[in-house]
Image: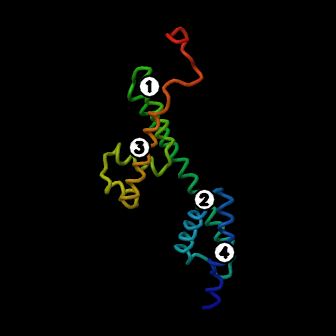
Amino acid sequence: MNQDKRSFDVIGQLAALRRYALSLVRNSSDAEDLVHDALVKAYERRLTFRTGANLRNWLFAILHNAHVDRRRSLLAQRKRDESATSQAETSYPAGQEQTVRLRQVQDAFMALPDEQREALYLVAVEDMSYHEAADALEIPVGTLMSRVSRARARLRSLEDEPKHPSHLRLIGGGND
């Protein structure tokens, strides 16, 4: 039994898994999340590990596959976002000024961090209550409220930006 436990020493592989994950995602918090996901998958599939096989290689393969799954998921999400964006553009024809303004708001919304955009979308667009949205995102209500508040503040800052670029000057006006 001790030999079986030693052959499945996941803790001894953590440093190497973290280094590999960091090289894949180039961000320490994302790397930690990736290692966590890989370890959860390894734990769930621990019965498929053959005694005597190379644990390090097995864990690295799981980590790599988790990374590939995440990248595919992100690409799919981006495509869905772009599709929704293009559909919204064709659904609401407006005057030139309104089209430009809608595009600016849309760009600002899409530029929000994922957590803020998700929270604001559920509350403002899908008209979910804070509790419903927090449940859907599996986060505390206070965290959701904070994300919605920061997203709204960031979008409001769009209103504070100058309407005309500062490098342009009106000619023929009153005070030339």
Which residue is labeled 2 in the image?
67
Which amino acid type is shown beneath numbered disc 3? Answer: Arg
> Which is nearer the N-term, disc 2 or disc 4?
4
When the figure is inspected, residue 128 is found, relative to residue 31, above or below; the finding is above
Q: Could you say where residue 74 lies in the image, as x and y percent from the top left?
A: 54, 50
Of badges 2 and 4, nearer the viewer stands 4
> Which is nearer the N-term, disc 1 or disc 2?
2
Instruction: Please identify the residue farthest to the top as the structure is shown.
Output: 172
Q: Residue 94 is drawn in which quadrant? A: top left
Q: Which mark is residue 58?
A: none
Q: Residue at image x 68%, y 78%? A: 53
When the figure is inspected, residue 94 is found, relative to residue 86, above or below; the finding is above
When the figure is inspected, residue 106 is found, relative to residue 98, above or below; the finding is below
CA gap, disc 4 and disc 3: 43 Å
> Which is nearer the N-term, disc 2 or disc 3?
2
Q: Could you say where residue 5 lies in the image, as x and y percent from the top left?
A: 61, 86
Which residue is labeled 1 in the image?
99
Q: Residue 4 is drawn in which quadrant? A: bottom right
Q: Is residue 46 shown left or right of residue 148?
A: right
* Residue contact between numbered discs 2 and 4, judged by CB atoms under 8 Å: no
